[in-house]
């Protein structure tokens, strides 16, 4: 059975960064203990990049931080400093949405799973996180 998609909107604290994402109303969010996520207490769900849309002039308020392998692109608002989304190393074809930055009313359930970012490679192969940014179709599911 295909999961019904809902349009979620959200953004940063000062509202200069706004976005729209298509995802289920029930999501799996990842709590990661890597050096960056643990300091920000960032718990996020991952969607295929094609389901994410940055709205209006939000791009001008974004800046990016990258470290280590420089695959993850940690975007945050230049004004208020909030990371409402980023491009994760685990899913370079996806977007990680900070679930606390989704506007109220569209997320019905959040299941939190733990990602051991301090042991990144082992966690990557054991969690199945890579599948989170793949578009599921009836053909893929059968």
Image (spheres, rainbow, N blue to C red):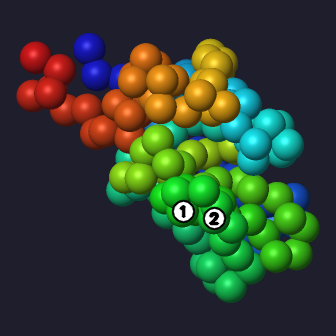
Q: Nearer the viewer, residue 113 or 138?
A: 113
From the top left corner, tell me how far across and down residue 129 is, in percent: 44, 29
Q: Is residue 107 visible?
A: no
Left or right of residue 136: residue 124: right
Left or right of residue 23: residue 56: right
Q: Is residue 47 above or below residue 55?
A: above
Q: Nearer the viewer, residue 39 or 53?
A: 39
SS type, badge 2? loop
From the top left corner, tell me how far across and down residue 24 is, in percent: 48, 30
* Residue position for label 1: 70
The crowding category of the residue bearing disc 1, from other C-alpha atoms within 10 Å (few below 14, some 14 to 19, many at least 20), is few
Q: Nearer the viewer, residue 134 or 41?
A: 41
From the top left corner, tell me how far across and down residue 61 is, in percent: 74, 79
Q: Residue at x 28, y 22 (%)?
A: 2
SS type, badge 1? loop
* Residue position for label 2: 66
From the top left corner, tell me how far across and down residue 136 is, in percent: 25, 32
């Amino acid at each position: 059975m295909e999961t019904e998609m809902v349009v979620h909107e959200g953004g940063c604290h000062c509202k200069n960064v706004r976005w729209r994402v298509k995802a289920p109303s029930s999501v799996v969010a990842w709590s990661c203990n890597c050096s960056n996520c643990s300091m920000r207490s960032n718990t996020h769900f991952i969607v295929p990049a094609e389901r994410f849309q940055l709205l209006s002039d939000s791009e001008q308020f974004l800046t990016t931080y990258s470290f280590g392998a420089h695959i993850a692109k940690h975007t945050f608002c230049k004004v208020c400093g909030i990371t409402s989304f980023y491009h994760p190393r685990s899913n370079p074809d996806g977007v990680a949405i900070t679930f606390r930055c989704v506007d109220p009313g569209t997320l019905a359930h959040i299941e939190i799973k733990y990602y051991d970012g301090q042991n990144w490679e082992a966690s990557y192969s054991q969690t199945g996180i890579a599948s989170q940014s793949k578009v599921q179709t009836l053909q893929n599911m059968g």
